[in-house]
Amino acid sequence: MTTFPEHFLWGGAIAANQVEGAFDADHKGLSTADLLPHGILNPHQEKAERTPGIKDLAIDFYHRYPEDIALMAEMGFSCFRLSIAWTRIFPQGDEAEPNEAGLAFYDRIFDELAKYNIQPMVTLSHYEMPYGLVEKFGGWQSREVIALFERYAKTVFTRYADKVKLWLTFNEINMSLHAPFTGVGLPESASEQAIYQAIHYQLVASAKAVQLCHEIVPDGKIGNMLLGAMTYPLTCQPDDVIAAMHENNQWLFFGDVQARGRYPGYMLRYFRDQGIRIDMAPGDLETLAAASVDFISFSYYASACASADPKQKEVGNIVASVSNPYLEKSEWGWQIDPKGLRVILNFLYDRYQKPLFIVENGLGAKDELNAAGEIIDDYRIAYLKAHLIQAREAVLDGVELMGYTSWGPIDLVSNSTAEMSKRYGFIYVDRDDHGEGTLTRKRKKSFYWYQDVIRTHGASLD
Ligand code: BGP
């Protein structure tokens, strides 16, 4: 029996800076992502030192999107999550008028998707902002960036009101705490005070975007986007349980503001204890209160553990956490926990009572071509299948789930390390970490597996 809801959306998710390439084409400005040629794990570069990187061409989606979208359609996608590069629309971030060439590019993409009845879901800002705003205003540490983001959001809502009905504000908004340059355009050495101030402005901007979307896009729905960092206590020792509660609050804080419209008590306490003072203008709290998101979206790759014992902490990918002894790790050290997906779905639904959308999930792995030139990626199929089964369990538990977009349906440049060899795709792209390769696309075994899952609306998972 298939239990996915009738209008459940199936698809995949990408981000502009990890696929498009064409980093300076058609008047595009430099973004913070363009300043991280080695990924967000190897952060902050000054513009003067900008070195070319693999993302400059990425997988050349900018020119090859018709072929790529046709392949998504062949898998049966009903939804495709992508982001707009803010710097294609406002190259420096503060121009009075948008860049028509950038707007026209996304028109072409949305028209191509419409040909196949694929619904776009668009992230306004996926780990990038105009570098011009970093130079001029120090990124999100300045309140002025709110109005510039509003101008950008208003421009794209107005332009695409008939073509795009599903929107997300900031990708993994909670990551600013761990990668401030990527999240809010602040140096990695920024103080907690500065980061939380920038986050406040970004949360206000997110709320303004929610309001604008409701005003401008008929039948539009807009969600937030969290890195779903589900953390378990390492043991049942109450101090470990409290440690896990604190870790979870770090990311839930963002969801609480975006869904409940106010700063939670545990955060106000944290600010008091740490001596953090947030500058709020009159009207900020009203803006937050007036703009609850329509749905909660999140990425889910792994779970983590927390311990009261600081010696337990290991260095993780971007976020340091404690290993779970019961789970296996991916080649990149991410702990694989399909049941954690059921846990987080129930947890978020219980907390917010709003529809949920899994907008990223997948396995980054090395793929080899066999003698026949095929890619038999059974490990990827096993990962995705186990997670989809748990998503279905959550639906059975009563969770309202709108859809599932796997991360990187086509191989793309990794965000944390800017590697091509960390592949997530159903579609292989011939390009290596040194930028060598023909960029030819090839269907992997998982391509046919996912096609079957979508065709049977999940029944083939049994
Ligand atoms: C999320 C980001 C994505 C994506 C994914 C996988 O955090 O939203 O942009 O890249 O993680 O991470 P990575 O590319 O580092 O493997």
Image: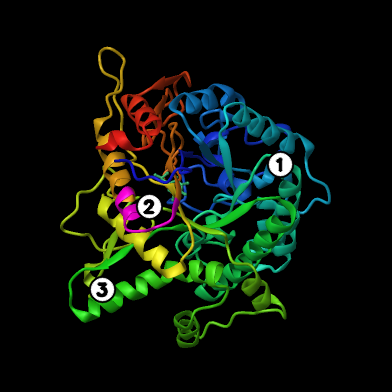
Asked if residue 162 is among those painted magenta in the image, a careful observer would answer: no
> Which numbered disc flags the more N-terminal residue, 2 or 1?
1
Three-letter code, disc 3? Pro
- Residue 311 falls in image quadrant: bottom left
Instruction: Judge depth for marks 1 and 3 and give the one in front.
Output: 1
Residue 380, can we see it? no
Q: Quadrant of the C terminus?
A: top left
Q: Nearer the viewer, residue 397 or 188?
A: 397
Secondary structure of the residue carrying numbered label 3: helix
| Residue that badge 1 annotates | 162
Crowding near the residue tagged with mark 3, few <14, some 14–19, many ≥20 C-alpha atoms within 10 Å: few
Q: Nearer the viewer, residue 161 or 445?
A: 161
On screen, residue 409 above or below 260: above
Left or right of 322 in this view: 97: right
Q: Dot 3 corresponds to which residue?
A: 310
Q: Position of residue 302 (x, y in %)?
A: 31, 53
- Position of residue 377 relative to residue 39, above or below, is above
Query: Which numbered dot is residue 300?
Result: 2
The quarter of the picture where the N terminus appears is top left
| Real-space Cα separation, disc 3 to disc 2, in angstroms | 25 Å
Q: Is residue 396 magenta?
A: yes
Q: Is residue 357 above or below residue 28?
A: below
What kind of residue is marked 2? Tyr
Give SS at disc 1: loop
Q: From mark 2 to mark 1, how far is it between C-alphas? A: 30 Å
Q: Is mark 2 within 8 Å of ligand 1?
A: no
Mark nearest the camera among 3 and 2 is: 2
Q: Which residues are magenta?
A: 392-401
How far is disc 1 from disc 3 in space, using C-alphas?
52 Å
Colour pattern of the rendering: rainbow
Q: Give coordinates of residue 112: x percent, y percent.
A: 62, 28
Q: Is residue 243 visible?
A: yes
